Image: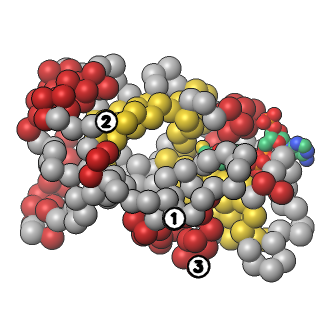
Amino acid sequence: MLILSCSSKLRLLEGTLRRGLPETLLVASDDSDFCTNTYAVHYRDLGACRALLGSAVNWDQAFRIHGFRDGLYEASRDIAETKGAKLDVLRYFTYLHSDPSSLPEIRLDPALRLSPLDVSHVDLLNETWLFGGNERSRKYLASLIRHFPSACLLDATGRPVSWTASDAFGAMGPAYTLPQHRRCGYSMVLTNLMAKQLHALGFPSYGNVRVENFEPQKMLERQGFQRQPNLCYFILHNTALNTDPTLTPRPAGESPA
Ligand SMILES: CC(C)(COP(=O)(O)OP(=O)(O)OC[C@H]1O[C@@H](n2cnc3c(N)ncnc32)[C@H](O)[C@@H]1OP(=O)(O)O)[C@@H](O)C(=O)NCCC(=O)NCCS
């Protein structure tokens, strides 16, 4: 993800996308897939946000909206009510590192090997991710592995014991360490490395952590990531359209990613 703030570059991007029509128009192909149909909103005028939600979004799809601004949830809720659509809301803290180059040098456990994630690891990610366990999530995770920076630690048999991917918004995650390998500093190593990598690519180094998921919050704070003042909302719209069963039951007592 490249962040464009300059109006001439945005115009250039628009021109490039227009020249790529109709391919650039086809951004989603599955009406019941929250992962594919994802929007991020940023606005200063809540009225503009309401107008956008009311008219520019395809309400025949299951879709997900990310945003920080006040009033987003209420706007979604009000419009959903008029359309008879069901919502689910997830609340996240966003953690940002302002200077990843100041993070300490990493020290790797010599028994483990550092590597980017490989598509052959996708089942492991799919079994352990909070939103995983079905074919759509598997496809989504495979696309993250293929297209965005990631890092994992492999044991002697080549199996990942800890990993961090990143997504189309440049956010780190999902992150996970196998339960028997926790509290060894593996996730801190990978977060440190990914933060530096994203920073070197010109992206902000950040991740979103569910409000009730304390372990990664402590881990990020310990590394100097700062919790941002506004909550980040992930609002799932038309939940009734998403009928994926979770194929892989999560082991009892396991905390989801
Ligand atoms: C969150 C998660 C990825 C952390 O993985 P981890 O590899 O255990 O993380 P680390 O070992 O790097 O750090 C965890 C803690 O262990 C401590 N630690 C690090 N090395 C240690 C060591 N040698 N001995 C004891 N503790 C150690 C760290 O200081 C940290 O403590 P803190 O929470 O008090 O700051 C893991 O708990 C997990 O997979 N949880 C479920 C999925 C999830 O919640 N993912 C995050 C979604 S945003």
Residues at discs 1 and 3 in contact (Cβ within 8 Å) = no
Apparent side of residue 93 relative to residue 162 in the rendered image (left or right): left
Residue in view at x 12 percent, y 29 percent: 82
Image height check: is 24 above or below 58? below
Is the CB atom of the residue marked by disc 2 within 8 angstroms of ligand 1's nearest atom?
A: no
Residue in view at x 67 percent, y 45 percent: 255
Q: How far apart, in angstroms, are the residues tagged by discs 2 and 3?
A: 34 Å
Q: How far apart, in angstroms, are the residues tagged by discs 1 and 3?
A: 19 Å
Residue in view at x 57 percent, y 37 percent: 209
Quick one: SS at disc 1? loop
**In this view, the mark in front (1 or 2):** 1
**Of 12 and 86, which appears nearest the observer?**
86
Quarter containing ligand 1?
A: top right
Q: How far apart, in angstroms, are the residues tagged by discs 1 and 2?
A: 23 Å
Write down the quadrant of residue 29 in the picture: bottom left
Q: How is the image coloured?
A: secondary structure
Which amino acid lies under the numbered mark 1 shown in the image of this protein? Leu
Write down the quadrant of residue 86 in the picture: top left
**Of 229 and 31, which appears nearest the observer?**
31
Residue 28 place in picture, x, y as percent: 23, 61
Residue in view at x 32 percent, y 54 percent: 242
Residue 199 place in picture, x, y as percent: 55, 48
Which amino acid lies under the numbered mark 3 shown in the image of this protein? Ser
What label sits on residue 87 in the rendered view? 2
Quick one: SS at disc 2? strand
Image height check: is 138 above or below 220? below
Residue 223 seen by the camera: no
